[in-house]
Image (tube, coloured by chain):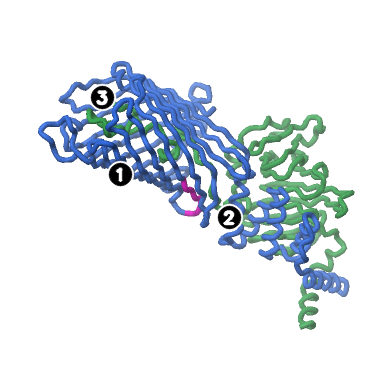
Amino acid sequence: MLFRMLAMCCVAAVPVAGAAAQQNIGVAAVVQNRVTGELGPRERVLARGDRMFRNEKVATGRRGTLNVLFLDETSLSMGPNTTIVLDELVFDPSGSNGRVVLSVAVGVTRFVSGILPKSDYEIRTPTAVIGVRGTSFDLYVKPNGDSTVVLGSGELTMRERERSLAQAVRLAAPGLAVSVVNGASPSAPGPVPPDVAQALSQLPGAQLGIAGAPPSLPSPGAPIPARTVTGAYSDIGKDKGCKSNGSHGQSGNPGC
Amino acid sequence: MAFGCAVALGVVLQAAWAQPVPATSGADELRSVFQQLLLDPGNPALNLRYAALTAQRGEIARAIATYERILIDDPNNVTARRELTRLRLLLDPPTTEAVLSLGVQYESNAPRRNPSFLTFNDTVGTASLAVRDERVLGDRRWRSFGTAFMNVHNRFSVGDLGYVGANTGPLLMLPGGWTMRPGLGGAFASRDYRTMFAEGSLLANFETMEAGPLEQINLRFAGQDWSGRDPGKDALIGEIGAGFRWRGIAASGDTVSFDPIFTYNAADTADNTYRAINLTFGYVVPMASFGPVEARSFFGRSYLGLELHLERDDYGAADRRISPPAEDRRDYYVAPGIRLVTPAVIGLNETWTLRYLFEDNISNEFINRYSNHTIGLTASWRL
């Protein structure tokens, strides 16, 4: 048994040996389909349980997704066709020192911050810098660098990359989005653009069917709603006991 | 090589010895479980424990991320699914949403009488306000609906309606990925600016987002008091309905809907007592599906809607005004319709709906046989 364990260790250690000198910053917790890590000249195909290293460039394939757990308990999820660089993670378990910096080159990511002070987190895109003041957000970076962040909970700031922190836009309303497009200043917080929502739906876990999503209000563009949900007024029109006519439908006319 | 082997051995031994530690409390145990998770990130028991601990400490986003991780590997993990549902409901921000609609419509047979009786066409103004509110109260998420509606006829003023209603209830988790919303409701209706009825109701709405067309089941038990108008219509009402949706059936972005509802209205008098089966079919499709149109053009941003309402009503007695007494009243109601929905025509964030509905009521009682054409234009605003 001990021999088998040692043998397995040695086999497993081969790809690790070269990277051991690198700073381990986390672990690949979920890997679906093809995901690669690139550290210097070497490229490796990631599997669950693989350690992640500082300065490692991570890329998901057309159907690939990845979830990384960092040493500070940060959770980072990547959707398909996404590339990031794990720039920096300094984590002192005593809590006296820390810093996390990630660069998202392209694609969709979900970031849930760890136990470091919130000001220690910074996420960069080709056009924007996001400062974390809360716990979770989604980020979509288009191939041209246009970046949109959607707040899940807490707070964040977003600024154009070349501008100062004083020119950052603060986002504190969960569910709203801020974008940096064409290198301009960040937009005001607003609804999530449809193309961004579509892109973010590719995040791992986004497709998990969960009950409890609020039903839409009666909307002209929506299917005819189930009327019992809203106690809709069309019930009035079903004044069937009214013998003079017994009108129906949603015209709302009892006609008695 | 030797260095790599030593590193890997250290990792393996650490994993082997990293048995779950006795619960200390709070942060220490959380940190301990997380250290084990770094060594075995696919371990469902560790993930469940970590998620539970983070949730207990109010770190909801991290707990949600962990449950999602579990479900990616094991979509049938009942605990993870139940807790994820519960936590998402807690984390979602409070929302209040309202839709105001103002419209005008032409009706060819406003009183909806047999053409042998006095019938006439009319123009009708309509106004409605629908409100939905969701927020966490205590440790439960509450969902509330409010609806107000009125119409004003140009000629048939005795048909002018008013209605206000509201209901509220908490969202509860059920096994199998369902939520239940037990609720209390109330409503008041007027006709010709006089009280028509007051209603109190108990509701139970069941919803699921599991794969499959069935999205909701709705139960309603209500008492209606018509004493100010027609005591014979005082009734206890039981109703059960369901909502089915199919998306992307024939075109990108389209939705097929089917909403069956069964109602039993037990009124004080037999001729006001009835059973009704109502089937509503709907189809909504983006106009852009019909051909290459520019997304921002009129048709590029418009929707086409088709609808069909079918209903059968069985009454407990014949119309008491009919002499000699006929057999119990039976009605068959058919109403097909079509809608064109276009947002932002005049730049006021409005959505326009042009709708045509044809109603045909076939009854074994002559007086209740009628047809009616309605064409209306409505502007709606999401407030």
Viewer-side residue, B171 vs B109: B171
Residue B358, visible in the rendered structure? no
Residue A77: give x, y in percent of width and height.
69, 52
User: Quarter-wise, where is residue A163 in the image?
Assistant: top right
- Rendered-image quadrant of the C terminus of chain A: top left
Q: CA distance from mark 1 to mark 2?
A: 34 Å
The answer to whether tags 1 and 2 share a subunit is yes
- The residue that mark 3 highlights is B111
Q: Is residue A163 magenta?
A: no
**Chain hosting mark 1:** B
Q: Is residue B207 magenta?
A: yes
Q: Residues within 10 Å of mark 2 (few under 14, many from 20)?
A: many
Q: Residues within 10 Å of mark 3 (few under 14, many from 20)?
A: many
Left or right of B347? Residue B366 is left
Q: Amino acid at mark 3?
A: Pro
- The residue that mark 2 highlights is B82
Instruction: Say what secondary structure mark 1 lies in.
Output: strand
Residue A117, visible in the rendered structure? yes
Instruction: Say what secondary structure mark 3 lies in.
Output: loop
Magenta segment boundaries in residue numbering: B205-211
The answer to whether tags 3 and 1 share a subunit is yes
